[in-house]
Image (cartoon, rainbow, N blue to C red):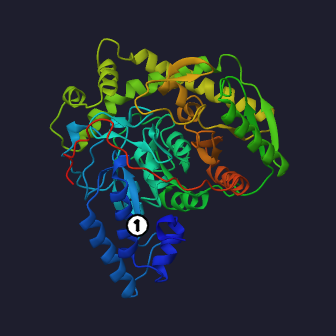
Amino acid sequence: MDSIDWGVADAAAGIRHGTISAAEYARALLNRIDEHEALGAFITVRADAVLAAAAEADAARASGATLGPLHGVPLAVKDNIDTADLPTTGGTPALRRHQPVADADVVRRLRDAGALVLGKTNLHELAYGMTSNNGHYGPVANPYRTDRIAGGSSGGTAAAVAARMAPAGLGTDTGGSVRMPASLCGVVGFRPTLGRYSQNGLILVSSTRDTVGPLARSVADVRLLDSILSTVPAPQDGESGPIRLGVVRSPFLDGLASDLAECFERRVAQLADAGLDIIELEFPSHTGDLIVKAGFPIAFYETPIELRRYLAASDIAMSLAELVAGCGSPDVEQLLEGLVGAGATSPEDYTAALTRYRPELDALVRASLETHRVDTLVWPTTPLTAAPIGADEVELGGVLVSAFLAYSRTTNLGSILGWPGISVPAGLDNAGLPIGIALDGPPGSDSRLLRIAGICEQLFGRLPAPQPATLPPVFGKHDDSLS
């Protein structure tokens, strides 16, 4: 196996045992990044710094130093997560010169385990979208078909991992922004229980909803990264007990493309044949209304608060209005302008969402699971595969709908509630685009989800590696980051 195909554990073992040096492995990844720069996966990569850090890792190994579980392994980091040695731009030109003075807690944990930061990955500007069509740094292209989206907002990390530019990386998830691009790019994406990983050092959309999440090409690698990133002990009952998966068909399975629907049903049948219990569930008809009332008001109200807080904590002499005016993506600028103008979410709507509708939604979902003795939901991660780059609307069940709403249809529920979820590759559609299947469970079921995801991976097999073609920029990429 070529070293660029190695996962995190493979690379760590190779470096530890001297099969390859950290410098050789880093150079192979950097060459891959250069070869496929047109995918737009990275905003900032400093090759000299990466190679210098890799040389230090090799020297430490040669001296007999104690090696961490990720020693010498370069990982990608989404560019809304602070790094002390690379800018954190948030994917917006207004912050293109912003250099944090300290690592985010999650980055510090990775470095303490021996990992290197390979570079900062592209994203939907300020993590406010589901396509990663960044108006300033250029769109992130899907490695399986470069005229299609990688998904957002963590599209850069997902594309980098899928295209073998990095063995794994970090994204962030507000409404599906780890799991959705993982699904569209054919990798594993994990959203942990809210609070399992630290939020310190992030450009947040919503403190009530946001979490960092790892993306990798195997469940085992996600499990390894989770063990390093988690700030809470794993529950002891996550690795045992019968598995009962709940399938909620309406509205979450409505309008699926025929090849995606066939793939989902085939994979569910495989799980049943393997001895897992598949239970058909129905949520009450007002579930969708609760999702709307609980979801958007929380994110929309908290975004201006979190952006102002980040600017102040980072000593950035810029107002929120200046940040918004400096946006390079018209969709994000228009949306953020609405959050601070006359149409801003009222404190009353926010309080109702947080204290009434969110708890009501949580109780409704828990009651349905408890009634049927189900603790894990299974459904397609997204209702369709990757759309063409630039599409703001997509066809779902013969109707044109917002890409934002379509792609977050399944993932949004767990994000609102702070529940963990994971997307596992399940196959390719008729156009050769990846399909993901998602598992969601109540808070604290992280280990159980990872266990079930591992079973899915064994049954479904791995996807073939993409073969990215050279892609001319769809619109001009600005090379004004500190690179």
For the image shown, how many numbered marks are present on the structure? 1
- Mark 1 surroundings: few (<14), some (14-19) or many (≥20) residues within 10 A: many
Give the image location of residue 376, x and y in percent.
71, 41
**Residue 293 is at least partly visible in this image:** no
Residue 186 position (above or below residue 349): below
Residue 233 position (above or below residue 245): below
Which residue is more in the foreground, 314 or 177? 177
- Is residue 265 toward the left or the right of residue 133 in the image? right
Residue drawn at 82 percent across, 52 percent down: 274
Residue under label 1: 115
Which residue is more in the foreground, 444 or 74? 74
User: Furthest residue to the top?
Assistant: 342
As shown in the figure, which amino acid type bears the numbered disc 1? Ala
Which residue is more in the foreground, 1 or 53? 1
Which residue is more in the foreground, 451 or 474? 474
Give the image location of residue 226, x and y in percent.
53, 57
Quadrant location, the C terminus: bottom left
Give the image location of residue 166, x and y in percent.
43, 59
Residue 399 position (above or below residue 420): above
- SS class, disc 1: loop
- Is residue 237 toward the left or the right of residue 349 in the image? right
**Residue 277 is at least partly visible in this image:** yes
Residue drawn at 45 percent across, 77 percent down: 15
